[in-house]
Image (cartoon, rainbow, N blue to C red):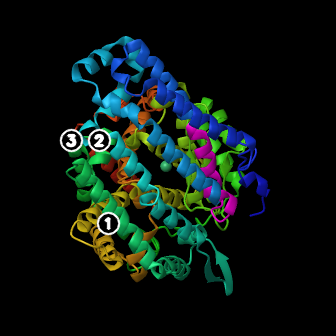
Amino acid sequence: MTENLSELLWDTIPLYPSPQSEELERDLTAAKDEAGRFRERYQRKVAALDAAALVAALVEYEALQELIVKPQMYAHLLFSADSEDDVNKGLSQKAAEFGNLMSRELLFFDLEVMELPDESFKGLVQDERLARYRHYLESVRKFHPYTLSEREEQLLKMKSLTGTEAFTRLYDELSASFRFKLEIDGEEQELTGEELLGLLHHPSASLRERAFSTFLNRHAEEGIVYGAVFNNIALDHGGELELRGYKYPMEPTNIGNELPAEVVARLMTVSEQNYPLAQDYFRLKARLLNLPKLKNSDIYAPVGEADRRYTFAEAKELVLDAYNGFNPSYRPVIEAFFNERRIDALPRPGKGGGAYCMGMTPTLPPYVLLNFTGNLRDVATIAHELGHGLHFTLAQGQTMLNYHAPLPLAETASVFGEMLLTRHLLERESDPHIKTALLCAKIEDVIATTFRQNVLTRFEERMHLTRKEGLLSSSRLCDLWWEENARLYGDTVEMIEPYRWGWSYISHFIHTRFYCYSYTFAELLVLSLYRSYLQEGASFIPKYEAILKSGGSQSPADTVRPAGIDLSDPDFWQKGYDFLRDLIEELKGTI
Ligand SMILES: [Zn+2]
C-alpha cells in the first residue's frame, strides 16, 4: 500500500495524552472517590427514595459511569492496537482491575432497585419524572430472580479476574501473538492472521487453501491452550447458570436482549430450514469458478476479473458516497471519523484481528479498529464499522443508561451500511461481470451473517450443553464444530481437514456468550428494513433514523415497531430469507 501511514493509524490523544499521563491517573482517582461518595449517599437508602430523589440518584449514577468508562475505553483501544507492548499490557490489566473494583462498589445500586417491593416499584415507574429511566429500571428488575446477595455478587466479580477474565486475556494475547510464514509467488512472507484470512479472497485456489490451512494449523498447534480456554469458559458458564437458577445456556443472553426464547428459537429454526438456499448458492459459485465442487477455502474466491484492489483513500470515498446517497446529512458524521483520525486501519504485528467500533458514552467520540488489506471485503468492513459509528453518534441524544442499543439491534446500522455500499457499487457499474462479482460478494456476506452465525450459535449451544457431561476435549470441540458446519454445507462444499479447528479463532465464544445470533437477527431485520426503503423511498429515512436515535432507551420490539416491523410475527424471519432468494435470482440474471 502506497499511502500515508499516519492516515491509517488512529489518534487517541484527544482521550488522554499518553498511558502514563496525569490526566488518566486523575480520572482513575476521581472515579474511585466519586464511587465511594455515591455509595455513602445511597447504600441501603434506595428503597426510601421518592421519584424525584431517584431521578437525581440516576443522573449522578450516569455521570459516574461515564467517568469510569473513559479510562477503560482508552486502555482497550491501546491494547487492541498493540497487545505486545508492555505499557499497553500493564494499562489494560490495570483498567480491568479498576473496572472490576468499580462494579463491585456500585453493585448495590441495581441490587436495591431489584429489591424494591413490587407495589412501590410500580408507583415509581409510572411517575412521569422517571419516564426516561423506565426502560432501564425494568431491565434491571428482570434479573432479580437470578441475582445473589451483594457479598456473593462481589465475590463472583472479584474471582472472575483470575477466572474467565484471565482466560479471555490469555486467549487474546495468544491469538494476537501468531506470526505466519507463507510462500507467495515463490517468496516466503511473514503475515499476520488477518492478512492470511484476507488471502481467502485471492484468485489462486491453492494459495487460498494454503493460507487457510496455515492459519488453522497454527491454532491446532495450540490445541491444549484453546481446549483449556474453551473448556473453562463453558464450565464457568455452566456453574453460573446453576448458581443463579437459569434453565438453559442461552437464557441470560435472551433476557438481556429482551427477546423471548421462542423468538430466538424460531430465528434459528427458520435459518436451518433455509440452509438449502445457501447450498443452492454454493453450487452456483462452483459453476462460476469452474470447479466441480467448492472447498470451504473457495467460498470467498473472487469471481471473474473482480480481483479489484482498493487503496484506503478509494475505499473512503466509496463509503462516503454510499452514505451520502442514502442521506446527505450522514456524510459529515462519517467523514469526521477520517478527519479526526478515529480509525485504525493498518494491520500489524500485535494488533488484534477483525474489526470493531467502540462507542462507550454519549459524550466520547467513537473509535474504529479494522485491518485493511485492500480487497472489496475490507471496503465493506469500513462501511460496516462506520454504520456502528453513525449509530453511536446519532444515539448521543440519549443519556448514558439509555445509550447502548440492545444487542440484537447493535448490528442494524452496520449491516444496513454494507447494503448501502453494495447498492452504490452496483449502480456505478455497467459491466455485467463486475455486477456478478458484487452480487456474489453481497450474497456471501448475507450467508456469513445469517447461516454461518447460526452454525456458530448452534455450536456454542452444543458446547455448553456438552460440557455439562464432563471435560470438553479439543477433539470433541472439533467434532461438534465439524457436525454443525456439515449441516450447512451438505454435499455442496468440501471442508478442508484443518477446518476442524475453525472454532478456535471465533473470539465471540470467549468474549460474549451467544453474541453470534445478533448478527443473524440484524441481517434479517436489515433485509426487511432495506426492502421498506426500496418501497417507500425518502419517507423511510426518518423511521430508520428514529431507530438509531433511540439507542438503548427501549426494548428491541418497541424500537422497531414504528418502522412497521413486528418481531413476534412468525413469518418475519422467512421474509428476510425471501429477500436473499431474490438476490440469488438477481445474480442468476447477470450470468
Ligand atoms: Zn458489527
The residue depicted at 69 percent of the width and 52 percent of the height is: 314
The residue segment tinted magenta is 68-88
Three-letter code for the amino acid on which mark 2 is drawn: Thr
Q: Earlier in the sequence, mark 2 or mark 1?
A: 2
Q: Nearer the viewer, residue 543 or 94?
A: 94
Q: CA distance from mark 2 to mark 1?
A: 44 Å
Let me know if residue 247 is in the magenta part: no
Quadrant in the picture for residue 363: top right
Identified at 29% across, 41% down, the residue is 147
Q: CA distance from mark 3 to mark 2?
A: 32 Å
> Which circle, 3 or 2, is nearer the viewer?
2
Of callouts 1 and 3, the N-terminal one: 1
Give the vertical position of 259 relative to 265 (above or below).
above
Q: Position of residue 219 (x, y in %)?
A: 48, 76
Write the residue at 59% across / 45% down: 73
Q: How far separated are the C-alphas under marks 1 and 3?
A: 24 Å
- 283 or 261, which lies in front? 261
User: Do the residues bearing badges 2 and 1 touch, measured as CB atoms within 8 Å?
Assistant: no
Q: Which residue is mark 2?
A: 147
Which quarter of the figure has residue 472?
bottom left
In which quadrant of the rendered view does residue 68 lie? Answer: top right
What residue is pinned by disc 1? 279
| Residue found 35% across the figure and 43% down from its top | 151
Q: Three-letter amino acid code at disc 1?
A: Gln
- In the picture of the structure, the residue carrying the numbered disc 3 is 570
